[in-house]
Image: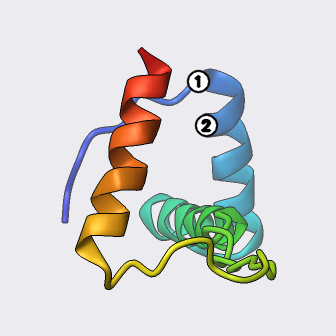
């Protein structure tokens, strides 16, 4: 595949020297070096940190949440105390 790249002169000189020393065409030398650089770049990417679940014993429950009336009473108390 053909494409055009704008390379800085020092990079082009090094690429030509690399291609000559390895008996590659300029395109094959660029492909080999870019593939190596992209592979190294992918390897550097960090994986997201693994999720860790932290838990503590909070003691016995202070209310039975299956008792709707007791639950609403506590929720109402907390709501009106904040205002």
The tag on residue 8 is: 1
Image quadrant in which you'd find residue 11: top right
Q: Secondary structure at mark 2?
A: helix
Quarter the C terminus occupies = top left
Q: Residue at x 80, y 82 (%)?
A: 57
From the viewer's perspective, is residue 68 above or below residue 5? below
How far separated are the C-alphas under marks 2 and 1?
A: 6 Å
Q: Position of residue 75 (x, y in %)?
A: 37, 49
Residue 61: x and y in percent read 63, 79
Q: Position of residue 19 (x, y in %)?
A: 64, 63
Residue wearing tag 2: 12
Callout 2: few (<14), some (14-19), or many (20+) C-alpha neighbours within 10 Å?
A: some
Query: Where the N terminus falls, by quadrant?
Result: bottom left
> Residues at badges 2 and 1 in contact (C-beta under 8 Å)?
yes
Above or below 41: residue 49: below
Above or below, comparing residue 77 to residue 57 in the picture: above
Label 1 crowd bin: few (<14), some (14–19), many (20+), radius 10 Å? few
Camera-side residue of 7 and 44: 44
Dot 1: what SS? loop
């Amino acid at each position: 595949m053909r494409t055009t790249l704008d390379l800085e002169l020092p990079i082009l000189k090094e690429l030509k020297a690399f291609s000559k020393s390895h008996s590659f065409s300029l395109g094959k030398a660029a492909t080999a070096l870019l593939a190596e650089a992209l592979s190294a770049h992918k390897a550097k990417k960090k994986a997201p940190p693994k999720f860790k679940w932290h838990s503590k014993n909070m003691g016995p429950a202070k209310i039975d949440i299956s008792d709707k009336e007791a639950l609403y009473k506590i929720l109402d108390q907390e709501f009106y105390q904040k205002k």
